[in-house]
Amino acid sequence: MSSPSVAASGATHHLMIMAYGGPDSLDDVGPYLMDVRNHRPTSDELIEEITERYRQIGGRSPILELTRAEAAGIEGALNDLAMDGERWKVWVAMRHWRPFIKDVMAEMQAAGVERTIGLVMAPHYSAMSIGGYYKRVESAESSIDVLPVERWNLNPGYLDALHDRLADALEKFPADERAGVPVIFTAHSLPERILENNDPYPDDLQETVAALVERMPGIDWHWAYQSAAMTPDPWLGPDAGEVIQQLQDAGKRNVLICPIGFVCEHVEILFDIDVEFRQLAEKLNMRLERIEMLNDHPSMLVGLAQVARGRAVDAGWIQ
């Protein structure tokens, strides 16, 4: 990486937003899984199982269009924050599907981009998750300097957006039941082996939960992971399905899911929560709701613009 220098007035600065990616059609599920699985063979049974999940949520993943909407909002916020004629351009890249990180970086390089801030649309750091994106950046073998944002789990704009969505979701329940509605905060599970390397992922998550709970005194909150893969290795728990069952055993009839580890709709939300967990709740004679995802919530987008610009200022790229 070259030595940073302060950009001249009127320069264009760049931010590359990265998200997980998802198939654009049912025919894309097999190739998509091949990339997710690092080109290991994928059984026909697994392809059909995942294809059926996407079939039930509309036949495709909405993550690219949602991320592009987020990018447009962040770009607008960055240019609102800009000083002395500075300009910002935001690029969108996917880890496991088109437009792939390496292809977007090639496009950026062809456009003359020399350096960019990198920001993953996931607030909590893990070497397996966020670190994996930056391995893709390295493997792109681009000459572009990428300055990473590793975490934004306590960003005020992100927390404001979560608080708004959570408060709105609680309004779905009758007023006389609202105070006692259990809230399950969730994030994507990861293999337990990450703990062997003191991975900060669980701590990052609990910091977010603590910040939210501080804003909502008296909330009946619970913690769970979701969307663990079916592998021989143990994954972080407890699983959200188990917590829903425990709440029913304790006599609860309502439950609100608040996914803090995801910012927009994709299969882990639209299928894992909206289909599987809702079916479980119905079986248990419970009412299950979830928060509206953050998507392009203005508070989060402004917060991320501040994160990106602050990273550039700290690096001496701009003043």
Image (spheres, rainbow, N blue to C red):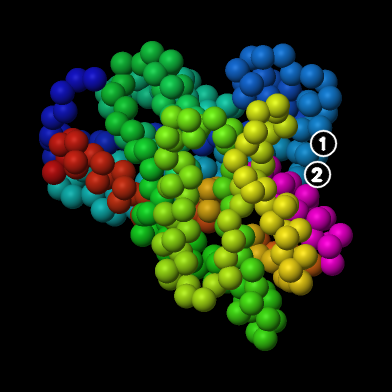
Please tell me whether residue 232 is drawn above or below residue 252 in the rendered image: above
Magenta extent? 265-285
Does residue 309 appear in this view?
Answer: yes
Q: Are marks 1 and 2 in contact (CB under 8 Å)?
A: yes
**What residue is shown at x 68% (from left), y 81% (from top)?**
177
Picture mark count: 2
Q: Magenta stretch mostly in which secondary structure? A: helix
Residue 35 locus on image (x, y percent): 62, 21
Q: Is residue 141 left or right of residue 192?
A: left
Q: Is residue 37 above or below residue 318?
A: above
Quadrant in the picture for the N terminus: top left
Q: Position of residue 199 (x, y in %)?
A: 44, 35
Expressed as whole percent of the image width and height from the top left, the position of residue 297 reads: 48, 58
Residue in view at x 19 percent, y 41 percent = 314
- What's the residue type where badge 1 is placed? Glu
Identify the secondary structure beneath mark 1: helix
Question: Residue 280, located in which quarter of the rendered image?
Answer: bottom right
Q: Residues within 10 Å of mark 1 (few under 14, many from 20)?
A: some
The disc placed on residue 60 is none
Locate residue 191, reporting x and y percent: 59, 33
193 w.r.t. 35: above or below: below
Under circle 2, the secondary element is helix
Label 1 sits on residue = 52
The alpha-carbon separation of the residues under discs 1 and 2 comes to 6 Å
Direction from residue 230 to residue 197 in the image, left or right:
left
Query: Residue beneath label 2, please?
Result: 56
Residue 62, image quadrant: top right
Residue 76 visible within the image: no
Q: Residue at x 67, y 42 (%)?
A: 227
192, 146: nearer the viewer: 192
Q: Is residue 84 magenta?
A: no
Q: Residue 125 is drawn in which quadrant?
A: top left
